[in-house]
Amino acid sequence: MELVMPVFACVIVLFGLIRRVRVLDVFMTGAKEGIRTLYNIAPTIIGLMFAVSLLKSSGAVDVICSLIAPAAQKLGFPPEIVPMAMLRPVSGSGATALLLSVFTDCGPDSFAGRVASVLAGSSETTFYATAMYFGSVNIKNTRHTLPAALAADFTALVMSAATVKMFFY
């Protein structure tokens, strides 16, 4: 298993040599393009990370979640997953930490644990992905992308609870 990457790199170099491709030149061109892409998306990612950090440290996420939790519970969603559902479109690592928190507090086989698991697997870090992909090609106007992606995230939330209810309860 440790040799997979070195063998893969050797196969690529060998294939390039057989096809008479200047492997180092092609590699350097790709590395330069990667640096340019990083340069284009870095401000967007830094701004997104700053906004997430600001929301977390200000307590705004906690306030919003405490306002939403009662309504979520009446609609059949476990209130324990509300923070994760709110954070998932913004931060994958933050949502994973909250997923582990749900597992610790409620258990992985609880209703909340199962809904959180399905939600984690069926939703996307919408704002991060939008910032990454649109920023990498210098698109400033996302038009309908963000509303459609957030609608998909909401659908994932609704369907995660419905699917767990249908198959386990």
Image: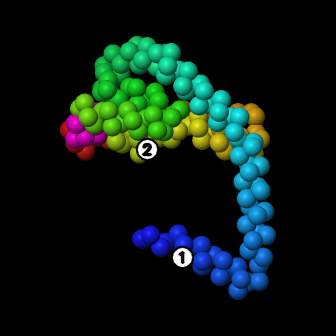
Where does label 1 land, which residue?
7
Left or right: where does residue 156 sit relative to residue 8?
left
User: In the drawing, does residue 93 fall left or right of residue 136?
Assistant: left
Q: Is residue 91 magenta?
A: no
Between 54 and 132, the residue placed more toward the observer is: 54
Residue 103 in the image: state x and y as whole percent.
28, 37
Tell me if I can see residue 14 in this picture: yes
Dot 2: few (<14), some (14–19), or many (≥20) neighbours within 10 Å?
Answer: some
Q: Say which quadrant the N terminus sits in.
A: bottom left
Q: Amino acid at mark 2?
A: Ser
At x 47%, y 73%, the residue is 3
Say few, some or many: other residues with alpha carbon within 10 Å of mark 1 (under 14 / 14 to 19 / 20 or more). Answer: few
Q: Residue at x 33, y 37 (%)?
A: 100
The magenta stretch is 107-114
Residue farthest bottom in this picture: 18
Point 55% across, 21% down: residue? 54
Quarter-of-image position of residue 169: top left
Residue 100 against residue 20 in the figure, above or below: above
> Where is residue 93 drawn, in percent x and y?
46, 38
